[in-house]
Image (cartoon, rainbow, N blue to C red):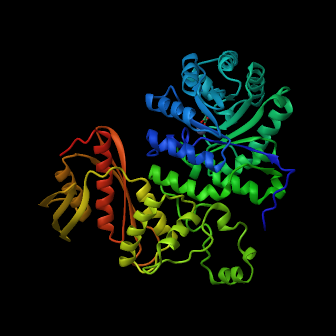
């Protein structure tokens, strides 16, 4: 089914909250530079509104919203605030240099939240919402109000609060399914009810914000769009609190592929979906499951013979979207030892990476080394090398060589040599629970940087016995979490590189402490 862009489609605002709700995913925290990089990628993707953070939550959040507001152009930049004066003032302080700013205030409305968390009556909730929307309105014209836990709020009261918020100046009113409790039919009923019963609803954009606790965030968001919602709040890779939020790539492609049904369209440049998904996954260290819709590595892989046969005869027999539409490259043409620099640069470009000459030179050197160890080099291999380069920190230490002797019931014996500038340091020790643990302990010994390994993840970049292993680690140092990444056809070496990458990040961010 070819995509048929029609002008009569209703425009849907895409509000991305990867940097706020997404960052609330355990293990997804990002530093300032990483947040800037994601914000720039979101602009390139064509996102209408970027929720850059919750400025009062921490100095780091404030700085991120402020720097994004100052420097990122092309999307509205939004900051979250509780219904409190100090939150709203702080949000504005962070947002005021934005090309277009939005303040997003929230106050819960459900009886559970009113009685147990807020200890407020219905009247007090309305009074607070009105006062806060008015305060925010003094700063900026674009105000969003969210009745937190809207889907467990009495319908009459929900309509009353929304009406009051719009009367006070809210230009977008959101319906958060905070705990992922709604079903598609229930969500459609709420949206219909709000549209029919809130008299001033035509003065605001009606938005939807779904969590995925029951695996229905995308379905619920689509039900809301079908009944008239004009904005969808979502995140890259569906990151977010607990089970996550509505996935941006899924909602966008559902609306695009089934525009015949939804009669709605977004302004997303869908070919940027895969590169943006990869970027967020690489930055957060949270991998995308292989069979994830739209951006998973297997999303367009046809394994069954009957499907492959059908695809060869006519693509649309088993394909409702084309891989290139979401940013997978058109062919998985294999590169190898004899491929040249131009072919590699071409392939990187087709995959959505814009690399400078120097970056291509480094990539080509790494590619040649890999080609000596691996016969066929796939797109995923190239992506892994590029990401490694993009996210490289200034490497204080690099791995020169390692040797481990280990076996069942034996304490591993490791010899490790690290390079630091022209200096080489070697350590030999018997330690650890296995070869990887032994190498980590040896690295900590040479560098003098003590860390605790919090997460260790290894997966193969492609298929085959000679596939590269990609290792992602998270380590803790003085209460801060640092990520590291390493790729190699030897998974022990990949682990050593990942651990060293994390240690180098600690050194870079703690002014080169350690030896
Ligand atoms: O899930 C939620 O209720 C939220 C609000 C702050 C919009 O994230
Ligand atoms: Zn949320």
Q: Residue at x 17, y 53 (%)?
A: 446
Q: Which residue is drawn at 77% across and 34% down?
A: 205
Q: In this view, does 511 lie above or below 314?
A: above
**From what the image shows, is residue 499 above or below residue 412?**
above
Q: Which residue: 21% across, 66% down? A: 402
Quadrant in the picture for residue 358: bottom left
Is residue 509 found left or right of 435 in the rendered image?
A: right
> Looking at the image, in which quadrant does ligand 1 appear?
top right
Q: Is residue 319 left or right of residue 120?
A: right
Viewer-closest of 227 and 391: 391
Q: Quadrant of residue 150?
A: top right
Quarter assignment of residue 71: top right
Question: Who's the residue at 30% across and 49% down the image?
Answer: 504
How far across and down, in percent of the image, does residue 405 sit?
17, 70
Instruction: From this view, report whether residue 477 is shown above or below residue 93.
Output: below
In this rendering, the answer to whether 161 lies above or below 17 is above
Q: Out of 439 and 137, give the one closest to the viewer.
A: 137
Residue 29 shows in the view = no
């Amino acid at each position: 089914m070819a995509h048929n862009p029609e002008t009569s489609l209703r425009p849907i605002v895409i509000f991305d909250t990867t940097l706020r709700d997404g960052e609330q995913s355990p293990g997804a925290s990002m530093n300032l530079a990483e947040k800037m990089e994601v914000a720039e990628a979101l602009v390139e993707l064509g996102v209408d509104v970027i929720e850059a953070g919750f400025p009062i939550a921490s100095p780091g959040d404030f700085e991120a919203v402020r720097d994004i507001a100052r420097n990122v152009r092309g999307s509205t930049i939004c900051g979250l605030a509780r219904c409190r004066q100090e939150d709203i003032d702080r949000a504005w302080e962070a947002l005021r240099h934005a090309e277009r700013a939005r303040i997003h205030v929230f106050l819960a409305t459900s009886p559970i939240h009113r009685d147990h968390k807020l200890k407020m009556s219905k009247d007090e909730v309305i009074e607070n919402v009105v006062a806060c929307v008015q305060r925010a309105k003094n700063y900026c014209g674009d105000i969003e109000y969210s009745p937190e836990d809207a889907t467990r709020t009495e319908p009459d009261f929900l309509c009353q609060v929304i009406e009051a918020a719009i009367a006070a100046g809210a230009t977008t009113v959101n319906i958060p399914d905070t705990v992922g409790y709604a079903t598609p039919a229930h969500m459609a009923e709420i949206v219909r009810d709000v549209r029919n019963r809130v008299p001033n609803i035509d003065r605001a954009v009606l938005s939807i914000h779904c969590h995925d606790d029951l695996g229905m965030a995308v379905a619920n968001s689509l039900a809301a769009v079908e009944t008239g919602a004009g904005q969808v709040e979502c995140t890259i890779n569906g990151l977010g609190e607990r089970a996550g939020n509505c996935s941006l790539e899924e909602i966008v492609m559902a609306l695009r592929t089934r525009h015949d049904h939804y009669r709605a369209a977004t302004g997303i440049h869908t070919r940027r979906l895969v590169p943006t998904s990869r970027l967020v996954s690489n930055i957060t260290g949270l991998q995308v499951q292989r069979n994830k819709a739209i951006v998973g590595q297997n999303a367009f892989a046809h394994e069954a013979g009957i499907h492959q046969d059908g695809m060869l005869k006519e693509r649309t027999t088993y394909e409702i979207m084309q891989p290139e539409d979401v940013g997978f490259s058109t062919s998985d043409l294999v590169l190898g030892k004899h491929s040249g620099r131009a072919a590699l640069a071409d392939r990187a470009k087709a995959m959505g990476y814009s690399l400078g000459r120097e970056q291509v030179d480094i990539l080509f050197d790494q590619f040649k080394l890999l080609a000596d160890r691996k016969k066929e080099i796939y797109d995923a291999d190239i992506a892994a090398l590029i990401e490694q380069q993009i996210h490289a920190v200034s490497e204080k230490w690099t791995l020169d060589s390692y040797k481990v002797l280990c076996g069942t019931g034996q304490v591993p014996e490791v010899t490790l040599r690290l390079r630091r500038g022209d200096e080489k340091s070697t350590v030999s020790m018997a330690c650890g629970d296995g070869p990887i643990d032994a190498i980590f302990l040896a690295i900590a010994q040479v560098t003098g940087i003590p860390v605790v390994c919090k997460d260790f993840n290894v997966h193969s970049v492609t298929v085959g016995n000679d596939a590269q292993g990609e290792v992602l680690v998270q380590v803790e140092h003085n209460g801060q979490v640092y990520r590291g990444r390493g790729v190699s056809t030897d998974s022990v070496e990949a682990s050593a590189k990942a651990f060293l990458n994390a240690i180098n990040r600690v050194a870079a961010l703690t002014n080169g402490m350690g030896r």
